[in-house]
Amino acid sequence: MLLTLSALFGWMNHKFLPLPHSIGLLVISIAVSIVLVGIDLAFPRQHLFESLTGTLFQIDFSQVVMNGMLAFLLFAGALHLDITRLRRRGLQVAILAFAGTLISTVVVGCAFWGAAAMLGIFMPLAWALVFGALISPTDPVAVMSTLKNAKVSPDLEIELQGESLFNDGIGIVLFTVLLRFAMGTDATQTSTFAIAELLVVETGGGIMLGLTAGYIAFWGMRLIDDYPVEILISLALVTATYAVAQRLHVSGPLSMVAAGLLIGNRGPRYAMSDRTQGYLFGLWTVIDEILNSVLFLLIGLEVLVLSFNRVSLDLAAVAIPIVLLGRLLGVSLPLLVFGWRRPMSLWNVAFLTWAGIRGGISVALALSLPEGSAKPGILPGTYAVVLFSIIVQGLT
């Protein structure tokens, strides 16, 4: 059903709108969801769309994204990234991915906590910081999908792509740490030393695992010239490495980025024939497009199964400018402190701020929050920010 709807909405977008593919799918799926909700309210006893909502209720969005799509999407994104250009902008990417995410998490969390208090919503600061952690990282899927239709300088493009790939892994680690703290986990696991150790182990371990597995796959490809087998090796690399990362409690997203960068840059030079390159990169482009389509469709259709109240919608509206402020400070402050290799212009800061798009990963993390926590206040805010950033920021 989801593939059928993706194909139908993709055709409608191409024929009648036409917006960038992913954004068009999201806009159409939201519009259809709103129409279906309206019809269901008008004819409450008819259950006209019970099969569709039943399917959506059966889908665990968080599990589908975090343990299904994410590994393939991150590997595909890193596979096409030029590591030479990335190395030249490595300082800026590292600053944005690490310091920027930390600053944004704190700014957004504190401001969201204050906004909730002003609206009469009780939300502990720890849970507000959890919201800051899940919403601060830019989404690599959304960013790369939007950049396909944007005309930006190569330097800014590589900074955005690199940042979105790496801060995704950093954000998930931060989210995990802060969630433990918010849930009142044993103090020995939430001390400053334990948090720092977890960050180092998860990030460093994920990168090392990805590089190790990537080199094994690279040498396997180098010893043969058989494109079906080499494609199978790339698929096995993604599934096996991500599963091992979860078992070892290291960052699966960062392991995918590391493996994708290695295979995508060393593979064509030393391990793949021209024929293999054509088939392998073509397949991963198709995988990327299909999963992107289904992901953006799901984000739009989730409106059918989510419930919001008036107060939470007010908080959601306030969350949009709060997140934009956090992104602005997360971009400008660390770059002012650590400096650019070129003069920093206000236009570059404004562009990096506005181009920091959130997507399905933030929604998946919000949906994974335990019931009975601050989830009723966090989920609407997450959804509002994601929709605003993809549609409004993505189109402008």
Image (cartoon, rainbow, N blue to C red):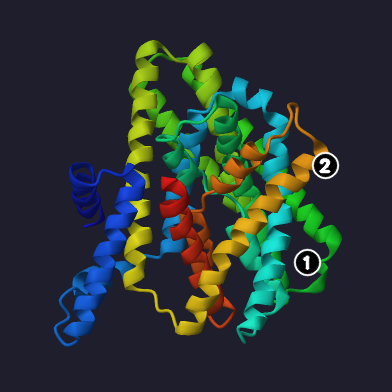
Circle nearer the N terminus (2, 1):
1
Q: Of residues 273 and 317, which is closer to you in this image?
A: 317
Q: Which numbered circle lies on residue 189?
A: 1
In the depicted structure, whether residue 364 falls above or below residue 217: below
Q: Residue furthest front?
A: 346
Q: Please tell me which residue is depicted at 81% across the width and 60% down the height of the picture.
A: 194
Where in the figure is residue 122, as x and y percent of width and height? 64, 85
Query: Can you tell which mark lies on residue 337?
Result: 2
Asked if residue 345 lies left or right of residue 140, the reply is right
Q: Position of residue 116 (x, y in %)?
A: 63, 79
Tag 2: amino acid: Val
> Badge 1, how many Cα within 10 Å: few under 14, some, many 20+?
some
The correct choice, above or below, for 370 with respect to 46 in the image is: above
Query: Residue at the location (19% across, 83% down)?
Result: 42
Of the residues shown, which amino acid type is indicated by label 1? Gln
Q: Report the quarter where the C terminus lies.
A: top left
Determine the residue positioned at 19% across, 45% down.
11
Q: Is 29 drawn above or below residue 119 in the view shown?
A: above
Eye-nearest disc, 2 or 1: 2
Q: Residue at position x 66%, y 24% from top?
A: 87
Above or below residue 188? Residue 46 is below
Q: Position of residue 375 (x, y in %)?
A: 55, 76
Question: SS of the residue at dot 2?
Answer: helix
- Helix, strand or loop status at disc 1: helix
**What is the crowding at mark 2: few (fewer than 14 residues within 10 Å), some, or many (at least 20)?**
few
Taking the image as shown, residue 391 lies to the left or right of residue 319, namely left
Q: CA distance from mark 2 to mark 1?
A: 31 Å
* Residue 304 visible to an observer of this rendering: yes
